[in-house]
Image (cartoon, rainbow, N blue to C red):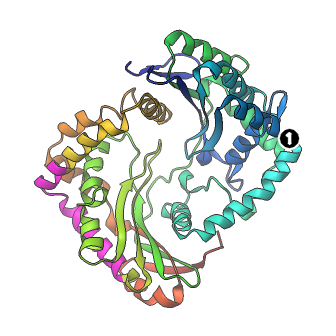
Amino acid sequence: MSNDTLRTPGPTIVVEASNDTPLVWFDIAIRGGASADPRGVEGLHRHAALLARRGAGRRDRAELDETLDNLGAALDVGVSRDAVSVSGLALSRHLDAVIDLAADVLAEPRFSEEEHARLLRETPQVLDEIRDDDSALATRWFDWLCSPGHAYGRTSLGTEASLTRIDRASAVDLWRREVVADNMVIGLAGDIDETTAAKIVTRLTERLPAAGRASLELEVPAAPARGRRTILVDKPDRTQAQLRVGHLSVRYGDPDTAALAIAEAVFGGMFSSRLMQEIRVKRGWSYGAGCALRRSRLPHWFEIWMAAGIDVAGPAVALSLELFAEYAAKGPTDDEVDFARSYLVGSMPFHVATARQRMQLAVRDAVFDLPPGYTAKLPEAFGALAASDVRAACKRQLRPDDAVTVAVTTAENAQVALAAAGGGTLTVVDHDEY
């Protein structure tokens, strides 16, 4: 069955039916997410979502987990930049029982004082784990500093300071304000028909307010930051440098989205891409190197990434910036565009092969305020683009002169080379400052 996305008062509903297996997947996206955290209280959406999952209705956390285990089902929460999600999987014969549990999490979370305190104790441990992971740490710093003041610079996890400002009352208030029917996208996939889907949607939303969609006043700088900057995140005893290079670009869904998808494939999205060939194949500086325009509802980063040996971190940044500048000015060749287009069109069936995948893409499109079927129809857009269109998009949207570079490595061994790499003013920070 083809995807149906219904846009009527109430939740946006996506249904992808398939009787291949006696399983049903559901994704409930609540618009908001980490980008809507109050400034200075970063981590609030994550905290509220995890707390809602730790007991709901008549069940505490242990009872809720035990019930799900007995049903052979899953019920998880998550937070992205643009939404909080409640997702699950159930055998068809247990679907009603699992939907009842999900409805309790949405409408009657307990927000236990005990679990609230426990979660506040646990989250700093997750922050420590990120600081131990050089790749995650590089992404965390890059997100924060790529475009100062941008809502997407807010960490979904929070900081040591912001976690102290999270209180239970604020989490309860956020949940009640945003978990309303009009603010939700509900996706269902698998062994389900339209009639059953409609009943499930009713049960998920009947105890929720039908208030209008939450107003999200998100901060996006009126003008992108100009000039190159390099931030060296100093961490002792590194043998590698986790590198991120990029700048604020356009939103997923911008008129240049299809052209940029081809452009990113040529530059850093395939093994034959320019970054992979120059960084890995020719020089062996990094096992991998890639780039992408982040997929989000608001304008987001165009980002290059790699992990280079500490002795070649400076040259790797210098070469990346040189390649980036040349690519922005000249764009891909006709042959590169033809190959990337063929690659992207050929790979799309793997992204829409299952009902669950099609549902998840449609839910994401709805959260991003895109037309139904936007992502699934991108191959048609690829086919309509000439190589000159891709080159024009590169000139419009790629800004190598404003690239921000983040390097997580040991300053003592890499600072001189990174300062000479052409990445602009270099600032050294301690890895645990943020």
Residue indicated by mark 1: 112
Eyeballing the image, is 167 above or below 185?
A: below
Eyeballing the image, is 154 above or below 79?
A: below
Q: Is residue 284 visible?
A: yes
Residue 302, position in %: x, y? 38, 57
Q: In what quadrant of the picture does the N terminus appear?
A: top left
Label 1 Cα crowd, 10 Å radius (few <14 / some 14-19 / many 20+): some
Tell me where residue 318 sits by quadrant.
Answer: bottom left
Q: Residue at x 48, y 63 (%)?
A: 146
Residue 430, position in %: x, y? 62, 78
- Which residue is more in the foreground, 181 or 424? 181
Furthest residue in direction right, as rendered: 114
- Which residue is more in the foreground, 411 or 226? 411
Q: Residue at x 77, y 35 (%)?
A: 66
Q: Residue at x 20, y 58 (%)?
A: 331
Q: Which residues are magenta?
A: 315-339
Tell me where residue 272 sits by quadrant.
Answer: bottom left
Residue 83, position in %: x, y? 58, 39
Furthest residue in direction left, as rendered: 334
Q: Amino acid at mark 1?
A: Ser
Residue 44, position in %: x, y? 71, 48
User: Which SS class for mark 1?
Assistant: loop
Q: In what quadrant of the picture does the C terminus appear?
A: bottom right
Instruction: Find out whether residue 378 is within the magenta segment.
Output: no
Eyeballing the image, is 366 above or below 269?
A: above
Question: Could you tell whether 429 is left or right of 159 in the image?
Answer: left
Disc tally is 1
Q: Residue at x 56, y 63 (%)?
A: 140
